[in-house]
Amino acid sequence: MPKENKCNASLFSTTCPYCGVGCGVDVTIEADANADKKLTDLRGSSDHPANFGRLCVKGSKLLETNTISGRLLSPMINNKKASWDDAITHAASKLNQIIAQHGPDSVAFYVSGQLLTEDYYIANKLMKGYIGSANIDTNSRLCMSSAVAAYQRAFGADAVPCCYEDLEQAELLILVGSNAAWTHPVLFQRIERAKKLNPDMQVVTIDPRRTATSELADIHLAIKPGTDVVLFNGLLAYLAAHDTLDISYISSYTQGFAKVLNNCAPWTIDKVAKQCDVTELQLLSFYKLFSQTDKVVTAYCMGVNQSSSGTDKANSIINSHLATGKIGREGCGPFSLTGQPNAMGGREVGGLANMLACHMNIENPEHRQTVQNYWQSPTIADKPGFKAVDLFENINNGKVKAVWIMATNPMVSMPNRQKIAKALKKCELVVVSECVSKNDTLDYAHIALPATGWSEKDGTVTNSERRISRQRGLLPAPGEAKHDWKIMCDVAKAMGFTSGFNFDSPSEIFAEYTGLTKADNQGSRDLDLSALCNITETQYNRLRPVQWPVNKSAPDGTKRLFTDGKFYTQSGKAQFVVTEFVAPEQLTNSYFPFILNSGRVRDQWHSMTRTGKSSELTAHINRPYLAIHVKDAESLMLNNNDLVSLSAAHFNNAAHLQNTTLHYRQKNQVMLPIVIDNNQRQGEVFAPIHWSASNASSASITSLYTDANDKISGQPELKHAAVNLQKVTYQHYGQLFIQQDLKVEWLREYFDYFVTSPVEKGQLVFFATDQPLAVIKRNLQLQLPLYDEWIGASGTILNSICAMRQGVTTLILLITPNHIDVDPSWIDSLLNSKNVTSEQLHGLLNQQPDKQFKQGKLVCSCFKVGENTIIDAIKAGCNSVDSLGRLLQCGTNCGSCKSELSQMVKQYKPNKFFIEQDQLIALEAIS
Ligand code: SF4
């Protein structure tokens, strides 16, 4: 609903579409003389309880990435434009034909935490209640299904006990497998602020890498990957040995403790330290803190969940909280942070193949009856469907013959990319609903359906703390795009389901969904939105962010669960779960000696189809990389920026590695430049997940991961692959700045290695090739015939070429036999200029950019402050993040870069400041 009206501008509240923090966003819409609307301003909603006005850099650049370029604007059948009627009819009749021939389990939906709850609800209803299969799974399987399974085992329901306030009220906050400073930035800012207000608050980070998040930590435990269960089982044994269990809580509200304690007992301090590869002293400090602190929150994320033993890891955390009664009260609890904006919404309406809608159990006949009665549906799925990894395996083996993929890019996000490609290639029908016109998955679509995106879609999302917020449709759908729920209803009707899908608005779907949370519930299920089930369309449009359950006894929502010690298990008591340490499947050996970890970078989201459009967001990290410890780099004789080729056992067999020539030169392998980073443990490397075949030659790191997944949750192992690294060398390395975009297909043909990245005035292509300079120039000239003047200059270590079009510099190419270290912002500034002066060219050749562009890598995206400027300021006397902010403004807007600033202060602060600080403290003490 509009908040205010002035002239022709209105302010609307909606929700950020990226991470699970679920920040509220206020957007100004203006209409021009033709009544065409556009979004003109965006800021964090000061009254949204998730962010209270804050936004991270991704959220604050939403308008910049919300453009029409790259959108899918009309339906396509076999890559040809088609009408909606034809596309819907084709999809529906093909689905019907396959179901008639092979049964309901021969078709599947693969959906996404990017869908709104209303979209998700329809997808689940169509598949489970009308088609009659449970083959609907979601990319949230890759994100938090282990957390779901663990909650269900312990609490009898997928119920997140905590709220964001608990993170601030905790006296001890433990962050496990979470780089929240980069992945949940606004939540991290809330934590930072809480620690500043309460200096006694202790923060422990548990992560094999030292990340930006660890900057805030009092203790960082860099445990060996995969050993979390050992760490927390050891904690339980320690708590028992030191008599710091909450016996009263255990006996009143839980079951199964004796067995669990027995299972944990062998994990003595020395054994845990050895297995986790941390010192006994570090362990004891952590265990002591946990045992002696009343209010403890353990927040965990992908480092726990994305593991072949993710569910046990999460349950070992939950066990520790149950054993000490640190749950169901202020500042306490085991808190799973969701990655996606609506991973929780999907869980609520049955987006996972093993759940029914509204947290009902697919294997419970009464629940099935409740759902079928409520829907009046012709059937109801009676067994779990295929979870993500199994789903693609069954497409590959021919059991599933049709898949409808919505708002996700499994070619990039699923492990074992080669198998996903094989499966999609042989699948009889691949339908893809997307808002972008190009991604790695769309290449396999028989039918592509244009969907609406953020600012057009209308519905609700649920964030990590169970808070439902409205995401509002503010702009009309571009081209022929339609809402996902509408597309599915149209296909359902075309399949012959005349009732059940006659919705005219998302509010009608929300009403039906909330009604189902009430059906046969009477307090037996956690997800209860009965107080919202009769709301009108106007009330739906005015819906304020609210945490479920929202019912008669809690009409304004519920902050935290289990305050009364009652759980959703049969006995009403929480269950301790015996958890076992199981080593990850892909162990290192002499051929594959490195463990590959993966994760996100600060300013990018998923496969970059949106954030990758912004030159400001790509400036922070503009190409994929492999972080490696200096000692490992030295042993492989690698320097920063050297390219390495990565192989995994299932990717290339060990014998293949002997043939180094073939190994090096295979196109489309994983090949990354290295970044020496002593925050890595030795023997472990890290690569970001975002880049794909749509913007790079060889950066799809999911191809290195196998099908290994958690046996309970089905969540794939995306943090642990055993890989081999080989240095790769080329004759030439280059950077190409060009005004117009060069197609990826063309780049693939001419360069062995490339990555494209937007810059302010066009496109930057990093490349490597063995082709001579003359051949590179000729290929470019053939590709760009309208560029009329080509000026080349040669230096001792650098060659450059500038191409003009009608007197304007439209291309600048830099080539060296080694890696180029030139500031992209400087070269970018020369692009599109009328005359590139001889001084500037000379500068290019000598790599001496003009002073104003010597900023180095961008650190603060909001105020465009680069690393060299910050280092200079630190060396000149700025010895804190706050003083840097006062001088340069960096870190004073969204705050996403504050952890990096803190790292830089520590790294570059001259020693004299420590003395000055000591002197200052001494002086203060005297005075
Ligand atoms: Fe969006 Fe950033 Fe908030 Fe996440 S933290 S919801 S990405 S603004």
Image (spheres, rainbow, N blue to C red):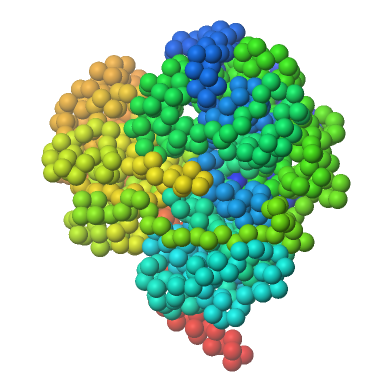
Q: Which is nearer the eye, 913 or 620?
A: 620
Q: Which quarter of the figure has residue 414?
A: top left
Residue at the limit of the structure toward the bottom, as seen here: 926
Q: Is residue 628 visible?
A: yes
Q: Residue at x 50, y 47 (%)?
A: 712
Q: Residue at x 43, y 17 (%)?
A: 428
Residue 3 as seen in the image, left or right of residue 222: right
The answer to whether residue 810 is above or below residue 819 is: above
Q: Is residue 297 visible?
A: no
Residue 164: x, y in percent? Answer: 67, 56
The answer to whether residue 38 is above or below residue 246 is: above
Q: Which is nearer the eye, 455 or 588?
A: 588
Residue 132: x, y in percent? Answer: 61, 24
Q: Which is nearer the eye, 786 or 315?
A: 315
The answer to whether residue 876 is above or below residue 363 is: below
The answer to whether residue 222 is above or below residue 77 is: below
Residue 391 as seen in the image, left or right of residue 498: left
Residue 7: x, y in percent? Answer: 79, 30
Q: Quadrant of the N terminus?
A: top right
Q: Residue at x 58, y 30 (%)?
A: 134
Residue 126: x, y in percent? Answer: 64, 24
Q: Which is nearer the eye, 489 or 107?
A: 107
Q: Residue at x 20, y 47 (%)?
A: 727
Tally the marks: 0
Q: Quadrant of the C terminus?
A: bottom right
